[in-house]
Amino acid sequence: MDADEIAAGRARWQARYDAARKRDADFTTLSGLPVDPVYGPPEGTAYPGFERIGWPGEFPYTRGLHPTGYRGRAWTIRQFAGFGNARQTNERYKMILGAGGGGLSVAFDMPTLMGRDSDDPQSLGEVGHCGVAVDSAADMEVLFDGIDLAGVTTSMTISGPAVPVFCMYLVAAERQGADLSTLDGTLQTDIFKEYIAQKEWLFDPEPHLRLIGDLMEYCAAEIPRYKPLSVSGYHIREAGSTAAQELAYTLADGFGYVELGLSRGLDVNVFAPGLSFFFDSHLDFFEEIAKFRAARRIWARWLRDVYGATSEKAQWLRFHTQTAGVSLTAQQPVNNVVRTAVEALAAVLGGTNSLHTNALDETLALPTDESAEIALRTQQVLMEETGVTNVADPLGGAWYVEALTDRIEAEAEEIFARIKQLGGEGPHQIGPMTSGILRGIEDGWFTGHIAESAFVYQQALEKGDKKIVGVNCHTGTVAKELEILRISHEVELEQRRVLAERKSVRDDAAVTAAVRHMVEVSRTGENMIPAMLDAVRAEATLGEICDALRGEWGVYREPARF
């Protein structure tokens, strides 16, 4: 790019920056030196390829979505939390919000993630252990008691039974008196990554995609600020993928959901802003920053050039980041504070829109109040003390970072091409990327490549080529054993008792009729969300709703592979 084009871009950026709102904050260094809101090539100089880097707030968004960077708005501190019953988790949420958290993120227990009630025989011993137990809308009411759902953004990490859980959230908001059309938050709903990595599915892919399509339509029409899909790379990376695989598989899944929306006749400029992303931030500091920058650039280009998005917001890749759980160690767990801080800083320098920082004891158990506070304070130290909010994309133009960004982008593009090849030449009713994803799931292509990457890394660890402090080097320690949070068996007994009590006082005939009607709607082309909402309002439980759909659609069984 020549000097005149660079100067014209800077002028565009300046005009947008001047017109944008900025936070009332001190944007100087610790020593009081003033800093510019963005830096670029020296005035009057050319920079080959600068169109791929650009300016913040301008296509291809390599340097961020907004011309102000974090001067306009800092990232949202969104701590992931859930354990025991709804009352216990409600207390943790109030602690997080009271300590400066900017949003909520709900972790559900394994029975809820699998669409099972707490009294299901398959739930035995798991209720409340890896998240909060939610059996019905009544639990959602308790979960958010005293928390204004119309005034706080809420993320829910659940995919298989995401739609009925979302309906419970809506009914809880209704019972608070909230205007549902104003709700803001994110539902994960990403079923592709379940088949690829996490394996918390209910049905075959096609019924799941039916529900996701219905949800996209409903939210676009009724709850425009709510994001019905958070496409998740986090679980793909935690399963052992490389950074490039995480990026490529995640964005490919996102392209599949774009194709799903288009196949429903939806306007890409209307529904694409409702797609968000969820990435892992691992320990290779610069690789992670490059991954986040490449993600924005790829998404913007594909949405514009392949899927026809013309609005800026439809081309924006918004993402939440969680520090890498898989990087935490049970040995010398206090070291995890350092790991988390480095990963969080990488996410921030990569321009994350919201962030969760893991607690030091999460490799052993759910976080204690103290470790949860340390995790929260980690973000606040970064935000308030380090100066990272002063300049947009401060590493932009660094030779190493730009070379890594280009390298990861090129690797991702090669993977996209291979995924599309998997789908073959024939047309798919949803789209070519979707066809390739479904074939890759069926053939074990994704899981095979992730397993190979995990194996290569494990070999490097065992040979000592890769180091983990406290595990295969620097193993001596004077640290004492941690006090960890333990979930009492009484939680499960109490949850089952409350569930039985609720079932005994509800109108069973109304529940049966509402669930039956929902199943009847599933046999038509009608949107299922209103019928599911009616079942939830009648206090149908999550297990009852999911079991009815299992009876209609069957249960997915992963093919055996050797």
Image (spheres, rainbow, N blue to C red):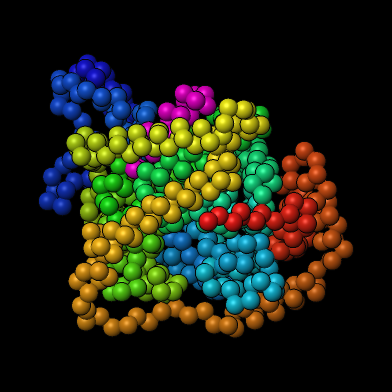
Task: Please say whether residue 348 is visible from this viewpoint.
Answer: no
321 is higher (above) or lower (below) than 118: above
In the figure, is residue 249 to the left or right of 560? Answer: left
In the figure, is residue 4 to the left or right of 78? Answer: left
Residue 308 at x, y percent in the picture: 52, 24
* Quarter of the picture holding the N terminus: top left
Q: Residue at x 31, y 28 (%)?
A: 52
Most frequent secondary structure within the magenta stretch? helix
Viewer-nearest residue: 444 or 21? 444
User: Does the magenta run of residues contain 538?
Assistant: no
Residue 234 at x, y percent in the picture: 44, 53
Q: Residue at x 30, y 34 (%)?
A: 406
Task: Please say whether residue 282 is visible from this viewpoint.
Answer: yes
Residue 284 at x, y percent in the picture: 27, 52
Disc tally is 0
383 is higher (above) or lower (below) than 318: below
The image quadrant that residue 426 belongs to is top right
Looking at the rendering, the stretch of residues picked out in magenta corresponds to 291-313
Viewer-nearest residue: 67 or 452? 452
Viewer-nearest residue: 560 or 500? 560
Residue 526 at x, y percent in the picture: 77, 40
